[in-house]
Image: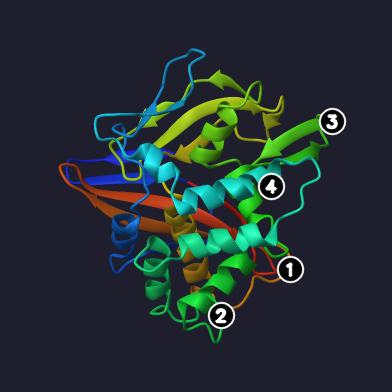
Amino acid sequence: MYVEGRYSSNNIKQRLFLLCSRSLNLGGHVCQKMWNDAENNLIIPGELAVNEGNNLDPVFTLVHGAGAQGYQKLQSEEFTRFHDILVDYQAQAYILNQQHINDFISAITQPCGPVEAAFSYLKTQANALPVGVTTLDQFRTTLKSLWFTNSNGFRHVFVGEQFQHKVPNEIRYKGFQNWYQYYTEENRPKVIEKQNPPTFVMDKRPTFIRDLKFKWRGKSKQGSTDNRMFVGTSPSFELALFTTCLLKGRGIAGGVHPPPGPYRTTNCDCTIHVPGIGDSTVEVKTVENQNGKINGTQR
């Protein structure tokens, strides 16, 4: 994962990833609409504080009082259902609770939210949606298929996966790209071991951290030397953004799954206007396997 920041007084560009098969622009103001409709995004730093210090204090701290609504947002239906699935994945021999998945998808696809904004946009993009998907209810089935059904996409991106690494011969982890998962794991004893403090980039939307390096359950991350995560974003916003990028990339490819062999990677520019700052363009990458499943994302 790579981050390069490019800024000017009127334009902010986060180039988050390199080496992809195609680069697309999510036009039509869809990113602004998804951002505006994500009512459970936490306000930084008014509702969620970030600790950049090289100390034992938590990276993320929920802010209480003074009108802060962070606690109420984390008690919302979408965060509560999100947490249920994270807990399911923590079990040593996890079995996904299909009711939890259905409840989560229902919570993030409520009318007037970021997922509905994404769906409305994708309906205008040729070949982006599966044939016959014309309603939000049908789109819920598409989301379940992309992220959960015979797919490790959700687990990789939002939870993290441990696996047997060959050289050196040890258990490592990959994925784990979500701030809320880090927040919940950090509040459990002896689960997170912070090795390098994060650099917090807050003049972007979404805000994000980089340079964070940590052991998770005693295991190091595969390949990458640090972790990068959006900060304070709701699960509905992140899932809407990543799904839009993947399906627009599929649409450009004619609506077909990638052939056996290399995965299809797609970079998408997503612009959000920030009052007092200008336009913030975030580039995200999605990875799709030959079965048409989310195989990973990066910020």
Element on which disc 1 rests: loop
**Which percent across, then down, holds residue 292?**
65, 69
Q: Distance from label 2 to label 3 (Cα)?
A: 41 Å
Residue 35 occupies quadrant: bottom left
Front position among marks 3 and 1:
3
Q: Whole-Å distance between the Cαs marked 3 and 1?
A: 28 Å
Secondary structure state at the residue bearing disc 2: loop
Viewer-nearest of labels 2 and 1? 2
Residue beneath the point at 65% across and 50% down = 155
What amino acid type should be assigned to the residue bearing mark 1?
Answer: Pro
Q: Position of residue 33 (x, y in %)?
A: 30, 62
Tell me the crowding category of disc 3: few under 14, some 14 to 19, or many 20 or more residues within 10 angstroms, Cα based: few
User: Which sits earlier in the primary sequence, circle 2 or circle 3?
Assistant: 2
Q: Is residue 140 left or right of residue 122?
A: right
Local secondary structure at mark 3:
loop
Marks 2,4: beta carbons within 8 A: no
Residue 253 picture location, percent across and down: 54, 75
The answer, for residue 265, to whether it is visible in the render is no
Residue beneath disc 3: 169
Give the mark nearest the N terminus, 3 or 4: 4
Image spot of residue 138 (x, y percent): 53, 78
| Precedes in sequence: disc 4 or disc 1 | 4
Spatial distance from mark 2 to mark 1, Cα to Cα? 20 Å
Which residue does the numbered mark 1 point to in the structure image?
260
- Which residue is identified by label 4? 88
Mark 2 vs mark 3: give the one in front.
2
